[in-house]
Amino acid sequence: MDRTQSEPDLSALAARAAAGDAAAADALLSRVRPLVLRYCRARLGRGGGGSYGTADDVAQEVCLAMLTALPRYRDVGRPFAAFIFGIAAHKVSDAHRSVARDPSLLAEDLPDRPDQAAGPEAAAIATADAQAARALLATLPPQQREVLVLRVAVGFSAEETGSALGMSPGAVRVAQHRALAKLRSHVKLREMSA
Amino acid sequence: MSEPLELAAVQRDDVLLDRLARRDACAADAHVVAALLAGLRADICADEDPPSAEGEGEARRRPVVPSARRRAARPAVAGLVAAAFLLSATGVAAAASRATPGSVLWPVAQVVAPAHVHSVMARERVLRSLAVAKTQAGRGDSVGARASLDDAISRVDEVHDADGRSTLEAKVTALRILLDGPAPAPGSPPAGGPLPSASPVQPSPGGSPEPSASPDPSPAPSPDPTSTPDPSVAPTPGTLSSPAAAPS
């Protein structure tokens, strides 16, 4: 993966966008949105019907919040990735809370057409690994989970992950190593008990 | 709790995560955990960049400050489409439909509200043509002024009422009378007094002229028709510093 997608780039783009540069805002949004989308999908998973609808909606909210806050954004040394993934983490938490609060969120509309997609079994098989990975990640402490989500799902380097989480790259490498070690032992325990 | 770290193992895991993030298939073979994380990554990105054959690395390798050519191509379009997707279902779409050139939402408006964008761009073009026409008239270039005025006239209809069409029409009419006044314009009643007649034109469509409209047509008070071009009045409307209306 190309590592030129670095924090200074995003921060510089954000500063220009905040100053009213529409082209910079456009570029920033097109760069940030896929990252936010992956993050929200990794954290929230698939919803009812097996779609990423809720996660994508949350990603949309994050981007809107970013656009809204952009005119007030000032580059004061805080990495822009920390700014955007701070928003994303809050929105994801809100989404978790609202789902827990409102169990009636099953489907927005009843489908009025036959679903041509793969059946539930095929879909479950296709996404089984992802579901299992999410279940494993949920067993980690929040910081280690965030590190792995940013590294694997979002595709950040250790340096970019450190920028987003306010950690040094070395601390990120140690945290991810410990997180993987925990996951491996977790899996081993499961295999032994099975 | 914290067992001693083996540096090589830390580095191995770092490499593994890099490969997982790259969707390197071999990474998934490392361990069950790696396979599961690879599955997560694949599931998340299943519908990402579908038509692109360039691969993720290429997609992310956009220049920090893209060249005008590249910006005009796929990345910008992708961004705008993404923005349209983002905003279409929200109230921000309404805000985008009122965006002006230079505002943050202007690129979004170009997708969400193309009709509004077209109207605003037409307004810019009309204002620019009027400014040029006035300057040309001030220099005594009546042919050039007429051509610029005609260009403005041809675009006025593309401006929506909400974007100040009535004001523009008043300005166009005022300038037309100014230019045609001395000439033998058949059937134009106010031929005698070119300048004062510019203001009565306002009542045309909207009835109530906008504040910004009044200063412009009214260089009239000066008795000399050649004094009407007032470049300081015409050029740009408020915040719009848009270069977008480049004459083409």
Image (tube, coloured by chain):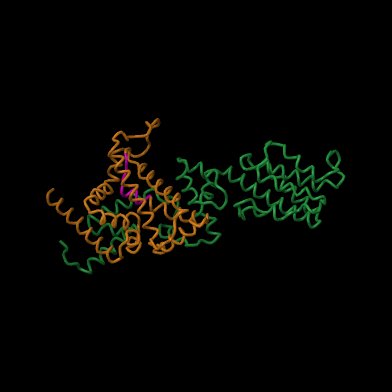
Chain colours: A orange, B green
Span of residues in magenta: A37-47
- In the picture as drawn, the residue positioned furthest to the left comes out as A193
Q: Quadrant of residue A114?
A: top left
Residue B43 in view in this figure: no
Residue found 69% across the figure and 36% down from its top: B207
Residue B86 is situated, as x and y percent measured from the top left of the image, at 45, 45
Residue B214 is situated, as x and y percent measured from the top left of the image, at 70, 45
Task: Give the number of callouts.
Answer: 0
Front residue of A74 and B59:
A74
- On whether residue A40 falls in the magenta region, the answer is yes
Residue B4 in view in this figure: yes
Residue A43 is situated, as x and y percent measured from the top left of the image, at 31, 49
Residue found 35% across the figure and 47% down from its top: A91
Dominant secondary structure of the residues highlighted in magenta in the image: helix
Front residue of A150 and B220:
B220
Front residue of B244 and B240:
B240
Residue found 12% across the figure and 52% down from its top: A192
From the viewer's perspective, tell me whether residue B204 is left or right of residue A56. right
Residue B202 is situated, as x and y percent measured from the top left of the image, at 72, 40
Q: Quadrant of the N terminus of chain A?
A: bottom left
- On whether residue A70 falls in the magenta region, the answer is no
Above or below, B133 against A50 in this view is below
From the viewer's perspective, tell me whether residue A142 is left or right of residue A107. left
- In the picture as drawn, the residue positioned furthest to the bottom comes out as B7
From the viewer's perspective, tell me whether residue A120 is left or right of residue B84. left
